[in-house]
Amino acid sequence: MPRRKNKFTTGHTYHIYNRGANRERIFFSKDNYLYFLKLLKKYSRKYQIAIIAYCLMPNHYHFLLRQDGETAVSRFIGVLFNAYAQALNRQTGRSGALFEGRFKDVHVDNDAYLLHLCRYIHGNPVKAGLVLAPEEWPYSNYLEWIGERPGKLVDHDFVDGFFPNRQDYREFLLDYLRGLDDLPPDIKQYLFE
């Protein structure tokens, strides 16, 4: 396989995403989502990966991650999804590739880009028509961002640094969902739309 263009580096932030093979589902039940989140918590701690934003969709996922330790984000993602795919295959009796090739990664090197990605990620279930409001989708860390769920899969210091008033983030996301504030073109090239 060709080498990745990004070299994962401590202290840097990355948008990581992929979808199911043939655009098929990667999560089939509530238990699949919950098991995956348990793995995410376990391995993010083990490999010192800070989770800034995430959203698990039925057939794809998005993460905004910061590598805080020496272990590369690529290693973390490999271990995480290998564990999940093996468990899912055992549970469902399926075989073959779960994902559409290797995961995609984009180095996020400025704050504006980073914040737009957060709202894109959290707005994904609404844009896909799965829910009417982002707080209705339980498989993202949006509720942690706005202080309505005490989850551990979020970098609270990061959120507080940009949005000390949680209502400001809610409005920032809703402006995007209402079409009042579009995503910059440099972000749109990395979306599954």
Image: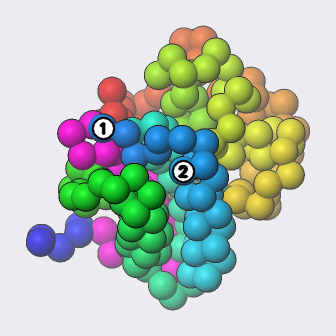
Q: Quadrant of residue 35?
A: bottom right
- Residue 93 visible from this viewpoint: yes
Q: Which residue is mark 1?
A: 24
Q: Quadrant of residue 169?
A: top right
Residue drawn at x 45%, y 65% is 87
Q: Nearer the viewer, residue 182 or 29?
A: 29
**Residue 112: x, y in percent?**
55, 43
Identity, as a three-letter code, of the amino acid under mark 1: Glu
Identity, as a three-letter code, of the amino acid under mark 2: Asn
Name the image quarter holding the C terminus: top left
Marked residue nearer the N-terminal end (2 or 1): 1
Tell me if residue 129 comes above or below residue 193 in the rendering: above
* 101 inside magenta stretch: no
Crowding at mark 1 (Cα within 10 Å: few <14, some 14-19, many 20+): some
Q: Quadrant of residue 82?
A: bottom left
- Disc ID at residue 32: 2
Q: SS for tag 1?
A: loop
Q: SS for tag 2?
A: helix
Q: Label 2, label 1: how many angstroms apart (C-alpha)?
A: 15 Å
Residue drawn at x 70%, y 59% is 153
Residue range (magenta): 6-23
Tell me if residue 142 comes above or below residue 50 in the rendering: above
**Residue 132: x, y in percent?**
64, 15
CB atoms of marks 2 and 1 within 8 Å = no
Q: Nearer the viewer, residue 156 or 126?
A: 126
Q: Residue furthest left?
A: 1
Name the image quarter holding the N terminus: bottom left
Q: Is residue 66 left or right of residue 144?
A: left
Q: Nearer the viewer, residue 47 or 108?
A: 47
